[in-house]
Image: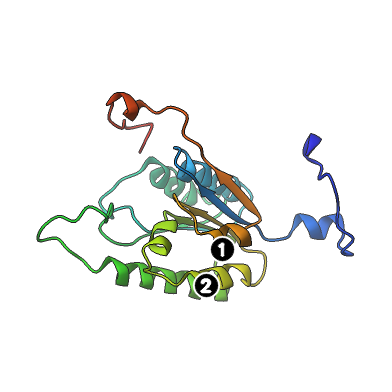
Amino acid sequence: MPQGKPEAVPDDGLTTRERRRQPVLAVHTGQGKGKSTAAFGMALRAWNAGWPIVVYQFVKSPKWRVGEEAALRALGETGKGGTVTWHKMGEGWSWIQRSGTERDHAAEAAEGWAQVKRDLSAQAYRFYVLDEFTYPMKWGWVDVADVVATLRDRPGSQHVVVTGRDAHGDLVAAADLVTDMTKVKHPMDAGRKGQQGLEW
């Protein structure tokens, strides 16, 4: 795509303007760092365009304070760009069960997905971040066929970005944009811990 121009344009009768306004389903997957970060970068652009934004975090804890949330919430309150709505489901890092704190993560993820479906049906937002959503799909907490059909057939011009490792092949096939973050090197390889300002 030299200079942002597609190599081929389909003979589908669409004008350039219509083609620019087609909704995009994006998937950020892979073993490398940066999947959510890239999605939130897209959300910043959506905010600047004045689009209403919603973020669904499917694995992050309600207690987990991430920089992107603080920044986007603050921007959403300025009245200059789009509005920002933020939802967190579950305890967070739910593959690590702590004795005495078990919750029904599957039910919480299913309810989160049900709300996403309601919002898409109502065209409540223009830009959706389904953060860490590949995990509920992988663990069988939501039905993959239902997810793919709902995202593929969503009405209007709603853009959706899904993040997380091990994206299901059917989701990848349905997406318009897929990025596989490949880890080449990471500080944790040398035993270093995550740092505020870099990981959250």
Can you say whether 66 is above or below 155 in the image? above
Who is closer to the viewer here, 84 or 174?
174
Q: Position of residue 151 (x, y in %)?
A: 57, 67
Can you say whether 163 is above or below 87 in the image? above
| Residue 123 showing in the rendered view | no
Q: Position of residue 118 (x, y in %)?
A: 49, 75
Q: Amino acid at mark 2?
A: Ala
Categorize mark 2 by other alpha carbons within 10 Å: few (<14), some (14-19), many (20+): few
Who is closer to the viewer here, 197 or 29?
29
Farthest left residue in view: 100
Local secondary structure at mark 2: helix
Q: Which mark is residue 35?
A: none
Q: Which mark is residue 170?
A: 1
Q: Residue at x 80, y 35 (%)?
A: 2
| Residue 44 showing in the rendered view | yes
Q: Residue at x 53, y 51 (%)?
A: 79
Task: Give the mark nearer the N terminus: 1 vs 2.
Answer: 2
Is residue 66 rendered to the left or right of residue 96?
right
Q: Residue at x 83, y 44 (%)?
A: 7
Q: Look at the numbered discs 1 and 2 and tell me whether their residues touch, using CB distance below 8 Å.
A: yes
Q: Which mark is residue 145?
A: 2
Who is closer to the viewer here, 29 or 53?
29
Q: Quadrant of the N terminus?
A: top right
Categorize mark 1 by other alpha carbons within 10 Å: few (<14), some (14-19), many (20+): few
Local secondary structure at mark 1: helix
Is residue 56 rendered to the left or right of residue 158?
left
Q: Residue at x 50, y 59 (%)?
A: 168
Farthest front residue in view: 169
